[in-house]
Image (cartoon, rainbow, N blue to C red):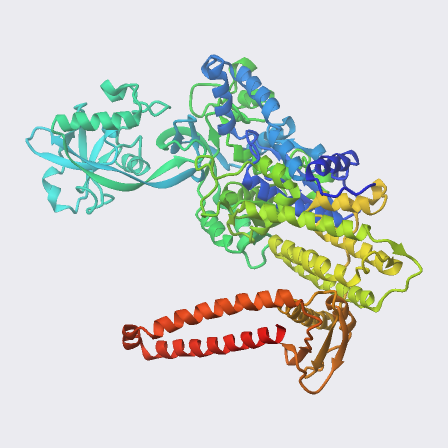
Amino acid sequence: MTIPSKYDAKQVEDKWYDYWMKNNYFHSTPDEREPYTIVIPPPNVTGVLHMGHMLNNTIQDVLIRRARLLGKNACWVPGTDHASIATEAKVVAKLKEQGIKKSDLTREEFLQHAFDWKDEYGGIILEQLKKLGASCDWERTAFTMDPEMSESVIKVFVDLYNKGLIYRGYRMVNWDPEAKTTLSDEEVIHEERQGNLYYLEYKIEGSTDTLTIATTRPETIFGDTAICINPNDERFTHLKGKKAIVPLCGRIIPIIEDEYVDLEFGTGCLKVTPAHDENDKNLGDKHNLEVIDIFNDDASLNSFGLHYQGKDRFVVRKEIAKELSEKGILVKTEVHTNKVGTSERTKAVIEPRLSDQWFLKMEELAKPAIKAVLGDDTDINLYPKKFENTYRHWMENVRDWNISRQLWWGQQIPAFFYGDGKEDFVVAENIEDALVLAKEKTGNASLSVSDLKQDEDALDTWFSSWLWPMSVFDGIRNPENEEIKYYYPTNDLVTGPDILFFWVARMIVAGYEYKDEKPFNNVYLTGLVRDKQRRKMSKSLGNSPDALKLIDDYGADGVRVGLLLSSAAGNDLMFDEDLCQQGKGFANKIWNAFRLIKGWEVDASLPQPKTSQIGLIWYEAKFQKTLAEIEDHFSKYRLSDALMAIYKLINDDFSSWLLEIVKPAYQQPIDKTTFDAIIEVLENNLKVLHPFMPFLTEEIWQHITERSSEEALVIAKYPLIKEFDTQIITNFDFATDVVSGIRTIRKDKNISFKDAVELFVIDNDKSSKEFDAVIQKLTNTSAINYVSEKVEGASFRVKSNEYFVPISIENIDVEAEIKKLEAELKRAEGFLFGINKKLSNERFVANAPEQVITLERKKEADTIAKIETIKSSLSSLK
């Protein structure tokens, strides 16, 4: 194959990805090898590739490709999550564009539209991951609503219900009025927002007295069923046992007493609205208060809202404040900051609402999961360790999980009602089993399937994905099958800390409940991707680059390098596009180094030079040292550090040093021994770099020599770690300092590389002389002489050794040196002029501190001496 002059990522990437797919390198089946398994955090089926996905999946691909090279049976299971709320919203919006309302469809009709939408758009993100180079086992692609996955979810629900862990309860829940569904506590984000505190005056029944309450939500007065005072508050003793009149609606409500009321907040009187505040609900239960729900499911007011019926709660807040003010009920308004719950998915303000929902008891289930991560003998490691505190906080304060959602897109709850009562239901995997149970429960043998009505609600998406490491291997339906026994527990999970509780902790809970074993060994929590200003990347800020455009501009390898170089383990990633450019530049440098090697003519009759021999011995030691460092970095999930070690090895040690050491003279051939060794070195470099830059490395690998499909780099054997000589590395580092010193003299004195120089050394350090020949070659030094006295000429030091290069007029480019010295003289004279001006200023000399004057006089003396030296050098050249 002819080697193109430039590396073209666009042509290379599709070619090799197709080749890998055609040869089925990514597919895994159980065999005698050690398995290495990763399950992808399933992206939402609605998703498109963004920077978080890019980072997360690059890391997973690095781990899986490395495992493959290490000879393990690498299995990376891809898939997508049905994402109930997000997907249903998209389908509803699409139907709306077609003039179809969800409410006009049956569940089956709506689900058909949803599956059509999924079939059209649901695979986009997985196809985009292929562009990144993700080496998933695509034959295993799973979807959380696949029939077998759904069957597993239903099986688990029934099992947990039968164990008494799932129950139905009438509770205060988090209601998302945008998605029109309940949310679990963890899906609510509490944000500080500035609002108002409204002071309202309530009349006391049968009296001219009034009391004032403070509320942030005046629209909820329609749901008031009591006023509460603290029994110890002497200000309100006269109100005990009396009744108040709710403004606008005129309803009579009791004044109750409870120490729950904070004497310091607001006015000390509290309006109690049991249907719309959890604390008020607790008070209401304690004092047997009426419960009045004033909202529709979209958070508009219902008929209890009187003339505000049908209006949105925030519209009503403005309008009711105006009405209350006009009627003299609103005493005053104050600016007030408080925490407002918002929906993680829709960003809507959450409405507390009483509702019949399904809950999973978490306290007992959480115990093995706490011990697994935080116990004395932990089974699961979190990287970085700092997230253990977050995990502890969530898990030790775990609340029952609200697992029902008022949606159609998702697994329908397998509860079947046979009557109108709240307890008139049975739970079963299918309607036929439910009928048997219903007949037993009722004693009514004449019941038929048509008498049963399945619960309309769907299960929380997380109730599906918490089974992911088991369900992708069919471990719930067939717990003893070959695949679950081989691949489970999985090895590494790579995900974001934002779903440490939502998903990671729950998977651990499910793993111990259904396999009595951890679902994975290690959890690597990536940081968030931020811009250079430390802002989180988002569509609204417009600071998130188009992932596919980045791949187009810099190549997938360049983007992978850019992402990983900016990603310190577990810390937020400050993404800078310049790092992708650096990645692209690195790819070009490796390509050019490869072209240089392949451009050498090989002569089998030539002996191997001593310089090449010692250079190759040094590089093998340096390679082994780096290999050990890479291994250590991987063991600590410091992938950025591992890549940087490889980057320095190839960019500096290989390209800048080794190739210069072995490079034949201009238009001269290279000996075969050295050439073969360099090819082997290059191949080993490609092997360690392959997990990070798979396309470039496979392209070069296949260009080196003709290879069969069994010899592709993607399945090559990773280099073995061997013992290495640390002293030769130390000696070479010393030698490179000598080379740098000579090169600096050549540059400073304008000595052409064509002209040989002589080197004299006072060897105080008793340095190794094994690299003298290398020093001579790299600096065009005719001889290295070891002496005991100083030699006239330019000099430098390396540690305690002194080096001298005699300078003769023949060596120097006189014209260039004169030009350089004249520029230096001009700069020095200008600097001296500035100092003299300052020192001749009487006010400056009189007012400046003594040490400042002393410093200026020293600068003056030094500059005068420098000018004399430059003038002397110039006169000797002219």
Residue 130 picture location, percent across and down: 67, 35
Identify the residue shown where x is 71% and y is 46%.
65
Residue 292 seen by the camera? no
Query: 601 or 639: nearer the eye?
Result: 601
- In which quadrant of the rendered image does the C terminus lie? bottom right
Residue 622 seen by the camera? yes
Residue 153 placement: quadrant: top right
Q: Is residue 169 left or right of residue 768?
A: left
Residue 221 placement: quadrant: top left
Residue 306 picture location, percent across and down: 23, 19
Residue 68 picture location, percent across and down: 74, 47
Query: 91 or 164: nearer the eye?
Result: 91
What is the residue that sits farthest to the bottom in this orientation? Answer: 788
Identify the residue shown where x is 46% and y is 23%.
424
Q: How many marks?
A: 0
Does 204 appear above or below 371? above
Residue 226 picture location, percent across and down: 21, 32
Q: Is residue 207 left or right of residue 643?
A: left
Residue 126 placement: quadrant: top right
Identify the residue shown where x is 50% and y is 16%.
95
Does 361 appear above or below 380? above
- In which quadrant of the rendered image does the N terminus lie? top right
What is the residue that sits farthest to the front in this orientation? Answer: 878
Query: 575 or 845: nearer the eye?
Result: 845
Query: 745 or 134: nearer the eye?
Result: 745
Q: Is residue 567 left or right of residue 178?
A: right
What is the residue that sits farthest to the right in this orientation? Answer: 605
Identify the residue shown where x is 54% and y is 56%.
375
